[in-house]
Amino acid sequence: MTAARFFEDCRFTLKNFFLPMYCRGCGERLLTEENCLFCPNCWESSPRITRPFCIRCGKPHQRMVGLGALSNFPCADCRDKPNRFIQRMRGAAYYDGAVGSAIRLFKFHGKRRLEKPLAELMVEFALEEMDGEAYDAIVPVPLYVTRLRERGFNQSLQLARLLDAAFPGTPVDESLKRIRPTTAQSSLASDQRARNVRGAFAVKGDTLTGKRVLLVDDVITTGETVTECARALKRAGEASVDAFAVALACPTPRYDL
């Protein structure tokens, strides 16, 4: 054991003795700082998105018992009415369980230590299911200036900056701007969300013209925010837009059917 590792272990032991940490999921005492708010059991049991899922919206299909086929294919909604602005949406996990709680703590309560384990979920998924050389730029969904001032950080930008292991050398570009304030989408009904963000985004400059863009957000629910971002990007001349989030808000498939 190196001296640095010895002193780090001593620091953690003393910290955990005087300031014990407990899992936000089950209440068990945390014995590691890998994830500072959730125990390994709660974190690993939070459902991930795995094959088969829709090749367009990324939402998982019901895995039919006995069929065994794990090929991805389009869902009925995307076959009938494909998104005109986003080629593919992807999410690493369901917006549920410990991952869903972690996103809310990170986004609304300033628990910025969670950005690393959340980004690691995205990296793990991308290494398995996405082409790391398919994009010219990673573009975070922007916040309006007043919301950014209130929150102190843009959660999508923080995540985008931690994806280099999956998309090596792909620069993070902040040319996409939110040009007017909007109501928090989480407080609105589904039918109100499209109107809320319509015309709220624009691209500044021409650094993204003709580029293949990966749009990054923390969670995709109805998809209205990323779609409106993609509309602005396409209007500015981007070649293609995919969207990638930590989580998708969709029902967890049952495997007992």
Image (tube, rainbow, N blue to C red):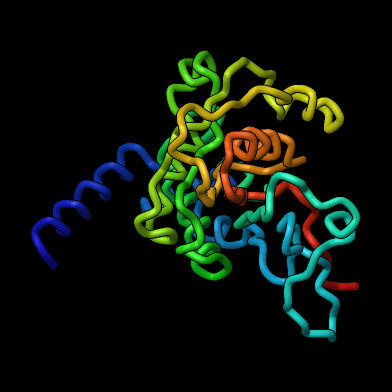
Instruction: Using the rendered view, name the quadrant where residue 166 is placed.
Output: bottom left
**Residue 242 in the image: x percent, y percent?**
61, 51
Up-down relation of residue 71 to residue 78 (above or below): below
Residue at 62 percent across and 61 percent down: it is 45
Query: In percent of the image, x 81 and y 52: which residue is there?
Result: 82
Instruction: Say left or right for 199 vs 211.
Output: right
Q: Quadrant of the C terminus?
A: bottom right
Residues 129 and 2: in front is: 129
As displayed, is residue 45 above or below residue 201?
below
Measuring from the top left, give residue 165's x and y in whole percent.
38, 60
- Given residues 244 and 50, the one toward you in this image is 244
The residue shown at (58%, 56%) is 42
**Residue with the most extreme left position:** 3
Q: Report the side of 184 relative to 5 (left or right).
A: right
Give the left or right position of residue 219, taking residue 64 as reference. Answer: left
Can I make out residue 117 in this image? yes
Q: Position of residue 152 (x, y in %)?
A: 43, 22
Residue 127 drawn above or below residue 200: below
Q: Can residue 98 be seen in this snapshot?
A: no
Quarter of the picture containing the N terminus is bottom left
Residue at (83%, 25%) from the top-left corner? Answer: 192
Query: Percent x, y for residue 5?
Result: 17, 59
